[in-house]
Amino acid sequence: MKALEGVKILDFTHVQSGPTCTQLLAWLGADCIKVERPGTGDATRGQLRDIPDVDSLYFTMLNHNKRAITLNTKSESGKEVLERLVKTCDVLVENFAPGALDRMGFSWERIQELNPRMIMASVKGFGPGPYEDCKVYENVAQCTGGSASTTGFFDGPPLVTAAQIGDSGTGLHLALGIVAALFQREQTGRGQKVLAAMQDSVLNLCRVKLRDHQRIQRGPLNEYSLAGKGVDLGDTTPRAGNDSGGGQPGWILKCKGWEHDANAYVYFITQAAVWGNICDLVGKPDWKTAPGYASPPERLDKISDIFDAIEEWTKTKTKFEVMELCNPLNIPCGPVLSMKELADEPALRETGTVVEVDHPERGKYLTVGCPIKMSDSEVEVLRSPLLGEHTDEILKDVLGYADEEIASLRASKAI
């Protein structure tokens, strides 16, 4: 049995944030019914195509384990189908522009009339406030949620991160809210609205930077390497390059081959508990007892110089050799792994973190698998559906339509 087996998801999501949420629920066993417009479908089916007239990797990697139905919700017969889906399903997930469901005639009040147990989950750019009607994309969310202002180097512009913390991060937050609402429904018998705003989700992921904003009001952030050089960091959390931002100083250091390999780097942390091991490893045994180096507070104003010296050692080793030498000594570090290295890593294939999937039109492709591993709910990653692939199946098996009724819907262009 799958963890969410028996739960039916009415998936009105598109692009990335919503599909991330519903794909995760589908991975965990929910029956996810993706509703799309006839003829066009989710916009990402055609975006960033690498094979002409074939669903893009953007779409396929966000819509695994789902069934697809096409439905013209502007037609009366299409609305009747949607009403039956609302009555039948447990959760409706959407990331439309504000007010879109209301204009379709499916306000929250109407949905409650049709199905009082329905959970309606929404991704929005912003929660209530001055920006609630504004349109948001990934990088806008990163900028308005505090990530960009704290990413990059101190003397450079704000930067967005490649991790999709705005879209996918919000989808993950919404999935948790849905599971919590399903659990609460077992106690109350009632559905409820669940909202995950992209700004809120990004800020939640940046909470340590909000922590530092408050700390800087009471004194310098001494663990930031620039503070050790006497640089005034200002009155709010600064961009701090590769500083760890925590109590254990860290930095990305060059490794052997960095001149021609853009990813020949390692993240190295000078954890206080293993300071002696670090000193011996990099050929600086005198640091263990030298004035100004022996204790963490003494080292704070020398962090940059310390990492410069450690880098002279790491440049003589590959990033993997650094790992092999540091791990037995409990020195925290990690190689900067490229997408190619991750795609080719056998261990990630074995755990299902990276999966090869066969698609009837594009052939085999590589995708991420479910990042959550459960001992009693194994995840099989199934390919994404073709546009409208399961329309007849859903109408028959889920809603009980007869063949002649389906033919009538098709003739009316409702599906």
Image (cartoon, helix red, strand yellow):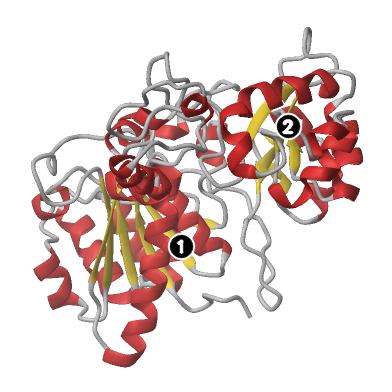
Q: Amino acid at mark 2?
A: Leu
- Picture quadrant where residue 65 is located: bottom right
Considering depth in this image, is 113 or 256 the residue closer to the camera? 256
Q: Earlier in the sequence, mark 2 or mark 1?
A: 1
User: Which one is closest to the eye, mark 2 or mark 1?
Assistant: 2
**Mark 2 vs mark 1, CA separation in Å:** 33 Å
Helix, strand or loop status at disc 1: strand
Determine the residue positioned at 91% across, 39% down: 325
Task: Report the quarter where the N terminus lies.
Answer: bottom right
Helix, strand or loop status at disc 2: loop
Considering depth in this image, is 96 or 308 the residue closer to the camera? 308
Dot 2 crowding, Cα within 10 Å, few <14, some 14–19, many 20+ = some
Q: Is residue 315 above or below residue 220?
A: above
Q: Which residue is mark 1?
A: 32
Residue 55 visible? The answer is: no
Which residue extends farthest bottom? Answer: 187
Determine the residue positioned at 28% across, 71% down: 119
Q: Is residue 241 above or below residue 103?
A: above
Residue 337, labelled with which disc? 2
Considering depth in this image, is 290 or 211 the residue closer to the camera? 290
Q: Is residue 140 above or below residue 276?
A: above
Give percent across and percent down for residue 232.
36, 23
Q: Is residue 261 above or below residue 390?
A: above
